[in-house]
Image: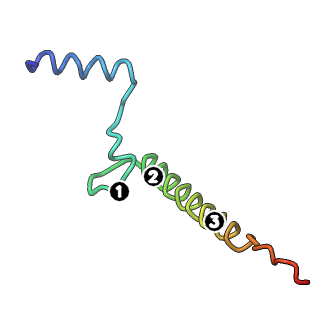
Amino acid sequence: MCQDQYEAAVAAFIRVKGVTRCPTACALPTQGTITAADRAALEDYAVACEWLRERRIASSKRLVWTFRVPVPATE
């Protein structure tokens, strides 16, 4: 693929998908300068991930601690 074809493919992808900023800068902490809105979105994402992680842990603990083994009847 020559440079012109590559640039045309990237431009077409951006037109179709509507990509306006680098997804890496929005998904992970970086050393680059990002806007306040992107920092807030990253913080919201981190909080949501932590909340989900804690919910999964709590759910699995409830499952383990509420499971009761039936005791056989003695005669």
Vertical placement of residue 33 versus 71, above or below: above
**13 on left or right of 73:** left
For label 1, the crowd category at 10 Å Cα-Cα, with few meaning under 14, some 14 to 19 and many 20 or more, is few
Look at mark 1 in the image and give the residue it sits on: 29
Query: Which residue is pictured at 81% across the width and 78% down the height?
Result: 71
- Residue 50 at x, y = what percent? 54, 62
**11 on left or right of 72:** left
Which quarter of the picture shows residue 30? Answer: bottom left
Residue 59 circle label: none
Q: Amino acid at mark 2?
A: Leu
Look at mark 3 in the image and give the residue it sits on: 60
Vertical placement of residue 45 versus 8, above or below: below
Query: Which residue is pictured at 12% across the width and 16% down the height?
Result: 4
Residue 42 circle label: 2
Kindly state the secondary structure of the residue where label 3 is placed.
helix
Q: Of 60 and 73, which appears nearest the observer?
A: 73
Give the residue at the far left of this rendering.
2
Kindly state the secondary structure of the residue where label 2 is placed.
helix
Mark before the other along the chain sequence, 1 or 3: 1
Q: Amino acid at mark 3?
A: Ser
Query: Which residue is pictured at 50% across the width and 52% down the height?
Result: 45
- Residue 25 at x, y = what percent? 33, 47
Mark before the other along the chain sequence, 3 or 2: 2
